[in-house]
Amino acid sequence: MASSDITEGASNGDRSFESALSCVRVGPDDFDLSTEVAALRAGEPGVGAVVSFVGTVREWRGDQADAAMPSTLELEHYPGMTERSIAQLIVKAWQRFDVRGVRVIHRVGPLAVSDQIVLVAVTSAHRTQAFQCAEFLMDWLKTQAPFWKKESAGGEGRWVDARTADDDAAARWGHVAPANAVGTALAPKA
Amino acid sequence: MKIQVRYFASVREQLGAGEQVTLPEPAEHLTDESTPQTVGQLREWLARQSPVHATALHAAKGLRMAFNQTLCSADQPLADGAEVAFFPPVTGG
């Protein structure tokens, strides 16, 4: 049983945490952008804008610029918390933007260069809300959802460092959440 | 008080996926130092368990903490049966 909280003028969907959770998929499987967008648009004649973002694995060559070995990426996550944290972001997005459908897919496990990693797709009546909502979700996902990337190339591996640029991108939405990369908000007091 | 501790990414590589810890019950003669009552104090208590714990949990690059699968600060109070996780800053997306 889904508790529905219908916002007039917004989507006529269920805006609960459980509903947000059903918009999220985390797992090893690849995704197809066309299929996901078609599903979001199905039976939604009020949709006038679809915005999607796909993140892909960028090549990494370690410290040897001319290394011929292909690089790989391993994505670790915190099962349970990952889905919960993304669903919480979607609930915040629903409160903030006049959007209809939301889909977030994030892959985990071993990935190769050029593989798809993440999909954020949003539908709305007009483009502005969909653009902003997609960007909001990506910015916050990068600093709040518990994923970790480890890059390897030519036998050399390293955990990817968090970037302060990502904290800055998230902060411009004006939320008061702790910075991820170098913030001391979560550090022990002692 | 029993706490399920979980580690991820570089912290997991040093300490394993996690451990179940049983903390001494708070007693009046004991100070916060000996009986952790917050997530931050649990981190310090764990760091005293071995040199490897100390290294992993005192890593320079800002350890993050979660209480029952939600990001939290060091002053988050502990609770019996809670799941507490320690991990480096996140790098998804």
Image (cartoon, coloured by chain):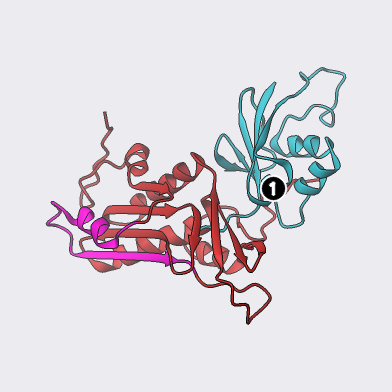
Chain colours: A red, B cyan
- Can you give x and y, in whole percent of width and height, for residue A66 in the image? 63, 82
Span of residues in magenta: A31-57
- Can you give x and y, in whole percent of width and height, for residue A181 in the image? 63, 60
- The single residue placed furthest to the right in the displayed view is B29
Q: Is residue A94 left or right of residue B50?
A: left
- Can you give x and y, in whole percent of width and height, for residue A152 in the image? 61, 64
- Can you give x and y, in whole percent of width and height, for residue A103 in the image? 32, 53
Residue A12 sits above or below residue A129 on the image: above
Q: Is residue A70 visible to us here?
A: yes
x 67%, y 60%: residue: A182
Q: For residue A115, which quarter of the picture?
A: bottom left
Residue A50 covered by magenta stretch: yes
Q: Is residue A87 left or right of residue B11?
A: left
x 51%, y 56%: residue: A110
Check the picture and name the quadrant holding the C terminus of chain A.
Answer: top right
x 66%, y 58%: residue: A183
Q: For residue A184, which quarter of the picture?
A: bottom right
Looking at numbered disc 1 in the image, what kind of residue is underneath it?
Answer: Glu
Instruction: Tell me which chain the residue with mark 1 is part of.
Output: B
Residue B65 sits above or below residue A56 on the image: above
Residue receiving disc 1: B13
Q: Return the residue nearer the eye: A27 or A103.
A: A27
Residue B35 covered by magenta stretch: no
Q: Is residue B93 visible to us here?
A: no
Residue B26 sits above or below residue A145 on the image: above
Q: Is residue B33 left or right of residue A185?
A: right
What secondary structure is marked by label 1?
A: helix
